[in-house]
Image: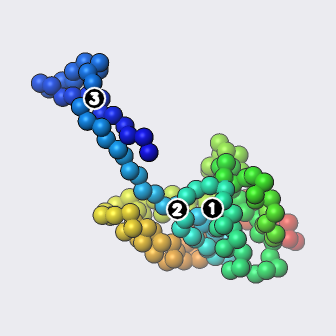
Amino acid sequence: MKPASVCCRLCGGGLRDSRIQPIKRAEYCFENFYVYGLTEILSGEKFFWELPSVNGKCFKLFLREFLPTSNKNTLHLIFLDNASFHSGKSLEAIAKVVLINFPASAPKLNPTERFWRDLKDWLAGKEMRSLRELSDLMMEKLRNYSEEKIKSLTGYQYLVTAYQEAIA
């Protein structure tokens, strides 16, 4: 990782001229984790998995990990937010999965966005001392979401109606 330069010096309550050379080099180290998740809008079933990156390879790995947990005769319609890693040639060959992209500029159409908002609102008042503590807290909360709560957050009536009409 390329070091960043700290480029200003406090001097008598103000900043000095920006042409002054940096007084210290700093390296920033960021740690991340990503939670991938699927929720079922009618039953409230859920599947979550933590991965170290957000990219097409991890997304495909997530889908392959999910499939053995589900009924092998079920066709899965998975609604996505149109992120770049949700598409690509590597995802085209997954059996029993149909990926449907919502428009990129319409997060209010995507029921999963309301679910993630609920989780973020719950996390907002929590204090964590480490990334691992945050991860553990999030995964415990995700495991404890009830099917009723998930249905209430993700069961958008227009999707429920469309599904019921499609299978009728």
Instruction: State if disc 3 and disc 1 touch (CB < 8 Å).
Output: no
* Nearest to N terminus: mark 2 or mark 3: 3
* Nearest to N terminus: mark 1 or mark 2: 2
Task: Determine the CA span between mark 1 and mark 3.
Answer: 39 Å
Q: Which residue is mark 3?
A: 22
| Res 162 visible | no
Q: How many marks?
A: 3
Task: Determine the CA span between mark 1 and mark 2.
Answer: 8 Å
Q: Which residue is mark 1?
A: 58
Q: Is residue 104 left or right of residue 127?
A: right
Assess disc 2: are there few (<14), some (14-19) or many (≥20) residues with their C-alpha within 10 Å of its C-alpha: few
| Res 14 visible | yes
Image height of 79 relative to 62, above or below:
above
* Nearest to N terminus: mark 1 or mark 3: 3
Q: Position of residue 163 (x, y in %)?
A: 79, 66
Q: Amino acid at mark 3?
A: Pro
Residue at coordinates 71% horizontally, 46% vertically from top-left?
103
Mark 1 vs mark 3, foreground winner is: 3
Q: Secondary structure at mark 2?
A: loop
Assess disc 1: are there few (<14), some (14-19) or many (≥20) residues with their C-alpha within 10 Å of its C-alpha: some
Q: Which residue is mark 2?
A: 52
Q: Position of residue 117 (x, y in %)?
A: 51, 57
Q: Amino acid at mark 2?
A: Pro
Q: Secondary structure at mark 1?
A: helix
Instruction: State if disc 2 and disc 1 touch (CB < 8 Å).
Output: yes
Q: Position of residue 150 (x, y in %)?
A: 58, 70
